[in-house]
Image: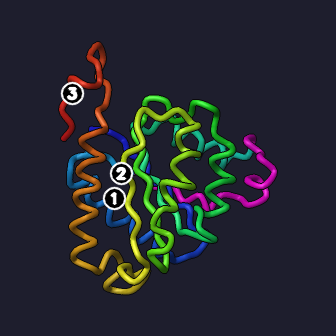
Amino acid sequence: MSSILLVSASPSRPSRTAALLDHVASLVADAGHDAVRLDVGSLPAEALLHADISDEAVQAALVEVELADALVIGTPVYKASYSGVLKTFLDLLPQKALAGKTVLPLATGGTIAHLLSIDYALRPVLQTLCPRHVVPGRFVLDAHLQKEGPDRGVTDPDTQESLRRTVQTFLHEHRPVAAGRPADDLVTA
């Protein structure tokens, strides 16, 4: 079983991005992996803005990234890019923080005009952190998400299916390394 860190980078509470990540967390757990959540927006703002890696909450978040076998990063799209709180957090990570890890980027937004924000804004930044692989991400329209209430989560059946396939691809590409065996020889649950 792998530990997969789901990073929510929405400054809002509740948020559609968090609802999306909850949906993905259930898919990851159903596949037999441990889904761990990190809400970057709940980290102390002053510590983030001043790059205070001595702050206990920031240190704990950095350790969670280090211990994760793979990451799912979810962000709302603002001004055609990922959230500022995500950028601030990514800036705190060591240069090779994602080495050996597979990453699935997800984004939420109000219009399909932001569809390419993952590839043009987020993917290049993630690549600088030396991941093993950044799999093709998924953009989800706000209209297909309910951020609170009894129907909280992904409400559109087509979006649910595309997310299932996206997560399946991510889990296939993520191959945990067992002692003495190369990652490509392992089968993921």
Q: Residues within 10 Å of mark 2 (few under 14, many from 20)?
A: many
Is 8 part of what is drawn in magenta?
no
Query: The C terminus is located in which quarter?
Result: top left
Q: Which mark is residue 186?
A: 3
- Residue 150 placed where, x, y %? 32, 86
Picture coordinates of residue 93, whole percent (x, y): 63, 40
Quadrant including the N terminus: top left
**Comes first in the chain, label 2 or label 1:** 1
Q: Are marks 3 and 2 in contact (CB under 8 Å)?
A: no
The residue beneath circle 2 is 35
Vertical order, 34 against 163 (above or below): above
Estimate the spatial distance between the alpha carbons at disc 3 and disc 2, rounded to whole Å. Answer: 20 Å
Q: Secondary structure at mark 1?
A: helix
Question: Vertical placement of 21 versus 170: above or below?
Answer: below
Q: Where is residue 126? Give x, y as percent.
A: 54, 44
**Badge 1 is on which residue?**
25
Contact? badges 2 and 1 (CB < 8 Å): yes
